[in-house]
Amino acid sequence: MELTMHDGTVRDLCFMEDLSNKSSLLISGGAGDCKIYITDCATGTPFQALSGHSGHILSLYTWGGAMFVSGSQDKTVRFWDLRTRGCVNIVTAPPPSGMGSGKGAPVAAVAVDPSGRLLVSGHDDSTCMLYDIRGNRVIQCFKPHSQDVRSVRFSPSAYYLLTVSYDHKIVLTDLQGDLTQPLPSIVVAEHQDKVIQGRWHPSEFSFLSTSADKTATLWALPPV
């Protein structure tokens, strides 16, 4: 099956379950018309194109249920609800404290913790944003890297945040304290070139990273 509805580079995709129709859906987005397409996996038929972003869509993430989130070159994070077939919230990250004014930077990566309470976004200006979904507020923006953040992921317990960057580094941030205060971060691994993606192991305290240095590496962390 080949899908050809996009008119530009497809940057990201994710699968969702449409519980109302008991069907599997493919959510995809990228460059070109900057639309997010919803496709029925059984038929391969795109049945809706969601408009709203004004820049390339760089990241998509779903955490179960009817919601998913997108990050874009237009510097916004958008929340979408399959039940309404539209955008239900738009978030623009402020600059980190003490780093001047502005409207943030392109959103290269997004993720939501398993509880559906916290969103994290990674940006091209080396910053990350923590956002309280239920409270509809930015908790804080912080800078764990020195170059573009390309991937962000909560650990399965949501105790830790894994971020990777073009600065070659993989950083672990502790989320177990007061999230409004400075967050303790440590470099736990490093590649010889830009790091592209990072993913937690589903049950062990380890993670996988991919890099422009042509390697995919499984890293084991010490027990905590």
Image: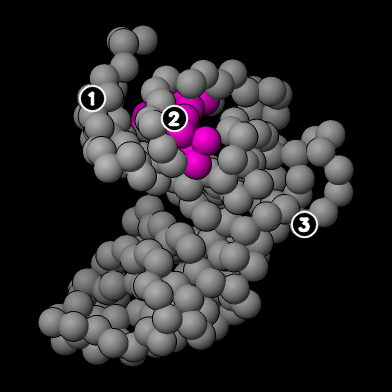
Q: Name the residue under label 3.
A: 103
Q: In which quarter of the image is the N terminus?
A: bottom left
Can residue 135 be seen in this snapshot? no
* Of labels 3 and 2, the one closer to you: 2
Q: How crowded is mark 3: few (under 14 residues within 10 Å), some or many (20 or more)?
A: few
Residue 156 occupies which quadrant of the picture? Answer: top left
Give me the disc on residue 170.
2
Can residue 99 be seen in this snapshot? yes
Amino acid at dot 1: Glu
Q: Name the residue under label 1.
A: 204
Q: In this view, does 103 lie to the left or right of 63?
A: right
Amino acid at dot 2: Ile
Residue ID at (39%, 23%): 189
Amino acid at dot 3: Lys
Element at badge 3? Answer: loop
Query: Which secondary structure type mostly characterizes the magenta part of the structure?
Result: strand
Q: Earlier in the sequence, mark 2 or mark 1?
A: 2
Q: Which residues, given as a range, are shown in magenta? A: 156-173
Q: Earlier in the sequence, mark 3 or mark 2?
A: 3
Residue 215, x across and y down, in percent: 25, 38
Element at badge 2? Answer: strand
Residue ID at (44%, 30%): 170
Residue ID at (70%, 24%): 181
